[in-house]
Amino acid sequence: MLEFISGMHPVSLVAIAILAIYFFAINWIFFYRFLFLNDWAKKESDSLETLLLGSEHVTHFSYLYNFLHNRKQSDKLLTLAEISATKDATRFLSFLSIVSSTSPFIGLFGTVVSLLGTFSELAVNSTGTLGIVTAGVSDALVATAVGIFVATFAYTYHQILKRKAYTTVEMIRMQGEALQSKG
């Protein structure tokens, strides 16, 4: 493994290092946000259930509680709460989107530079065989594979968190509608 890494082009190694940082970041964001949104959705679901069972107010752990506590309920206030909840629920989704769209290009850049290095080395050493070419090409393609690998996870995480955020915000919206129907 060490021999393989030491034979790679430095730009490919930098591209793979950047992609490794991306991979660490998207995993941290995903697990942190998934657990956060899961907990939040559970609280909103419980609050919605109490409203549907006859309560006149949202529970103290509902997102709406902060907006409605000691204030007169209004349509504009409920809309503001929904917009604020959407902003909070979708935090870091743009980063996941950026990673999913840029990581294949970072990998491809490492591949292209590595291939250029392989072909320029072949031009200098005219005794290049097919084995040297294939070794250079296989080393170069590792960066592209890593880029696609990271992009796949980033895109999947983005979609899962986007759905979880949508569900959470919808529960807040339904609580607002339940409150409006009672008042």
Image (cartoon, rainbow, N blue to C red):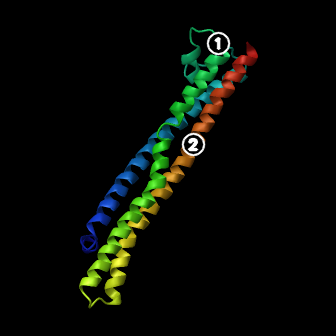
Above or below residue 18? Residue 4 is: below
- Which residue lies under the disc numbered 1? 73
Above or below residue 89? Residue 155 is: below
Say left or right for 154 vs 65: left
Image quarter in which the C terminus is found: top right
Considering depth in this image, is 141 or 24 the residue closer to the camera? 141
| Residue visible at 38% across and 52% down in the picture | 22
Above or below residue 149? Residue 183 is: above
Q: Quadrant of residue 50?
A: top right
Say left or right for 137 vs 95: left
Residue 109 location, x and y as percent?
38, 64
Secondary structure at numbered mark 2: helix
Could you tell me the amino acid type at mark 1? Gln
Mark pair 2, 1: CA separation: 29 Å
Considering depth in this image, is 35 or 87 the residue closer to the camera? 87
Residue 67 location, x and y as percent?
56, 17
- Which residue lies under the disc numbered 2? 162
Could you tell me the amino acid type at mark 2? Lys
Considering depth in this image, is 80 or 26 the residue closer to the camera? 80
| Residue visible at 50% across and 42% down in the picture | 93
